[in-house]
Image (cartoon, rainbow, N blue to C red):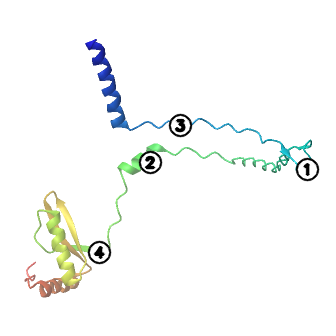
Amino acid sequence: MLRLIGILTGAVLAIALLIVALGVPEFSEPEIVVEPEPAVVVAGQPDTVQEPAPDPEPIEEPAPDPEPEPEPVAAVTPEPDYETLVDQIFAPEAEPADNQNWYAFWSPFRSEIAANGFVSKLQESTGIDYRVVKVKTGVYEVAFAYSDDADVREKLSRISAATGLDMSDS
């Protein structure tokens, strides 16, 4: 008897836990069967029964146009040369050289972030275009483009005037 009470209590607790965890199940309503319309009795003529009006005939839709046949392919495209593509990816052509020369005017920086910060401050104050050049790991130089020696002297004087640093011996 005690076992039976334990089994029933466990079952009730399990069902209660499922209802709490998943919610109360929603049962669907039975499908509604549509009955045919009853015959209509015309007033004044009790013996005469009028049948419901028949459904109108469906309108026929025009048949869809037949699909056009695909045009014949004149020539089959050749398969690309994968070896050439792989060679181009792993051995790209050298970039064209700049027509401008770059003059490194400051002692090298140990981090690229520091060099970029220096460049951004100089660009704000001088308006000259600078480039950070990675010489090797941990060595980053700051350089500007020049066309001749007079251009180098002119840009160094602009940097000196903007920063107050003596750039004459660079």
Evaluate if marks 2 and 4 touch, with contact meaning CB atoms under 8 Å apart.
no
Q: Give the answer, above or below, for where 106 lies relative to 23.
A: below
Kind of residue indicated by mark 3:
Ser
Q: Which residue is mark 2?
A: 85
Mark nearest the camera among 1 and 2 is 1
- Percent from the top left, x then y, of residue 170? 10, 78
Mark nearest the camera among 3 and 1 is 1
Evaluate if marks 3 and 1 touch, with contact meaning CB atoms under 8 Å apart.
no
Q: CA distance from mark 3 to mark 4?
A: 80 Å
Q: Give the answer, above or below, for where 121 lies relative to 31.
A: below
Residue 44: assigned label: 1
- Callout 4 secondary element: loop
Kind of residue indicated by mark 1:
Gly
Instruction: Identify the residue at horizontal 17%, vertical 65% (top origin).
Output: 113
Which of disc 4 and disc 3 is earlier in sequence? 3
Q: CA distance from mark 3 to mark 2?
A: 62 Å
- Which picture quadrant has residue 136? bottom left
Evaluate if marks 3 and 4 touch, with contact meaning CB atoms under 8 Å apart.
no
Q: Which residue is mark 4?
A: 100
